[in-house]
Amino acid sequence: MSKNFLVETTSVDSSARAGLIETPHGPIPTPAFAPVASQGSVKGLTHDQVAALGAKLILCNSYHLFLRPGAEAIRAMGGLHQFISWTKPILTDSGGFQIYSLAPLAKVRRDGVAFASHLDGSKLFLTPEDVLDIQLKLGSDIMMVLDHFVPFPSTAEKVREAVETTIRWAGRAREAFRNRETGAHLWGITQGGVDPDLRRRSTEELVTLDFDGYALGGLGIGEAKTQLHDVLEKSDSLLPKNKPRYLMGMGYLADILEAVERGVDMFDCVLPTRNARNGSLFTRQGVVTIKNKKYADDLRPLDEACACYTCRHFSRAYLRHLHERKEITAAVLNTIHNLHFYLDFFTEMRQAIQSQSFQRFKLNLMNTLKEVNR
Amino acid sequence: MSKNFLVETTSVDSSARAGLIETPHGPIPTPAFAPVASQGSVKGLTHDQVAALGAKLILCNSYHLFLRPGAEAIRAMGGLHQFISWTKPILTDSGGFQIYSLAPLAKVRRDGVAFASHLDGSKLFLTPEDVLDIQLKLGSDIMMVLDHFVPFPSTAEKVREAVETTIRWAGRAREAFRNRETGAHLWGITQGGVDPDLRRRSTEELVTLDFDGYALGGLGIGEAKTQLHDVLEKSDSLLPKNKPRYLMGMGYLADILEAVERGVDMFDCVLPTRNARNGSLFTRQGVVTIKNKKYADDLRPLDEACACYTCRHFSRAYLRHLHERKEITAAVLNTIHNLHFYLDFFTEMRQAIQSQSFQRFKLNLMNTLKEVNR
């Protein structure tokens, strides 16, 4: 099975590119956005709705699924695709981010990470090989290596340590995967914070390991935008052009545009879905905070130009009413809208790249969407 | 606009009948089941999903909508159909049940009911004319008169009082509607508990008022099944055959079968939708309590014979996982299944009546569905 990444078009005036990632469950057109389905469902939606919105892949959380129902249990049921009945590509994270952020007392040792389950406090220890094994059992299409993640800001010493641990673990995961090669992707994660030398070292070492794709880790956690952009540019120059790049967890459209301009191909974020549940709804005219009293008798759709089910049928007044009444259907209708907005944005961005009009697309959006992004 | 109720078929060996209720928003084939959409949405589903499941009408709660966003606000937005974008028939209750059960200090006076809002304690007073006015503002297809509801058991004196109040109020509502006649239905509600004489008096008096349909009130609140059946039979003999009958809030399939056999045409209940959210799922083999550990690796659908979206795609193991993780999508998928089960049951029951095989249909179900009903 091919694990090719085909770059179809590269912008003449930036590093933005349109491509196609081949996976065992079909191709993913890039730039791509993965809706988050932590536990195997995009909260509030059926898979049919998610697919109809144009999602080409979803992200599931290894950490959560490893704890419950368990990787082995899922393997025994035929793998994650079978278990959750999703037929398109699945991306799984390494679980590292959840371990460092959710699990108490996470402690990085030479061979892996020790932590206590956030559910029952039981003590667990995962090596890079374990994390690969979990994702192989899940049968995901794109697997991520275990990395060592440190907060921003951290001392140079801490960042250096994270870089070295990440390189070591990446090598071990890559080696383990060599012996268990499947059609699925294994992607490396670079670290190094915003330190150019450390980021360079991390990236160069990971490139020599020849992963199927590369995530840029340790970003979007408080660094300045200029620092972020510097890292993106440095990474763009160091990473092979023929491998997809992934900016994990970053979801503001302005950030996505800046990243795509600097050669990033893939994104995931809870932003559209979580904000939908909180009643924060994206439109081409800015964010609609639906609980606002002024929408109580507003008979317009969220966005006149939007073709989603929610906008074609329902008024802001009704959506506000459902949100204020805490009706489950509010989460459903709002999620449909926000996800449509995001996936539409990605489709249009891809078309803009293909027609060599990415810069105009970006400029238009940056001007009109200021409100949307903050 | 015709408000006819067309009885298409009456069983040769029982009072079960198949019919068609004409409303301003289209016909309702009977026996009919109204999914509950208290606030204007069937919790967890989009209207498209509800309609695709075969629902021909929904029930909205006057009390809740009267409090928020308010009947006048809804009228100003074009009425309830327009406000919630539901194009099929809407049945609204009188709000009486909510007033007596949710609102503290409800006190029946000669001219109406005084109560305090369960939301902010504000003091409210509604006359039968007010309750009609609220529903006219909502623009519902089938409106219910304000009745006086007493718990079971109540003293004969209390029940008698409720009967007299209900008759008086029904007369006032009927009179008010005469002056504001629309194509919508106004249905009366009989009271009298399980006392044959009081039920007779209530029914006869309401029949003289010539409502478009009749609900049997004050039932399903603790009386014995034999008592319930006696009231149904007595009512069947007293109510005009050419008007639809409605057993409010009663949702167990066994009760529905007994009621249909005794000439009842319409039902509403939160049972399929509320139980779905609680993980109690109806199947032809009995209730599946999805949280049960034994379903953790059960790859079968909820019901092999079920054609709903949930059963066509998902395993019990996945549904249990989503339910245990408290994923919103669990409520969605479970509600789709339970509502499909109910609406399918009604479709089959109607066909059985039309083909003069209702008794066999009932017997089969009573034998195989014992588990489903309790």
Image (cartoon, coloured by chain):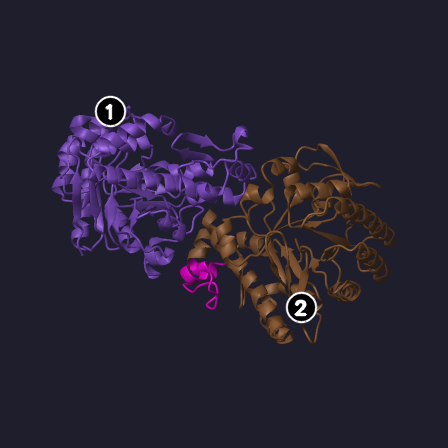
Chain colours: A purple, B brown
Determine the image quadrant of residue A237. Answer: top left
Q: Nearer the viewer, mark 2 or mark 1?
A: 2
**B370 left or right, relative to A140:** right
Q: Measuring 73% from the left and 39% from the top, which residue is drawn there? A: B104
Look at the image and tell me whether residue B291 can be seen.
Answer: no
Determine the image quadrant of residue A123. Answer: top left
x then y, percent, for residue B131: 72, 42
- Do pointers 2 and 1 mark residues of a single chain? no
Q: Could you tell me what secondary structure mostly forms the magenta stretch?
A: loop
Question: Magenta span covers which residues?
Answer: B291-317
Judged from this view, the residue extending furthest toward the right is: B157
Q: Is residue A177 above or below residue B6?
A: above
x then y, percent, for residue B162: 82, 50
Determine the image quadrant of residue A366. Answer: top left
Residue denoted by label 2: B17
Amino acid type indicated by mark 2: Arg
* Residue B292 magenta-highlighted: yes
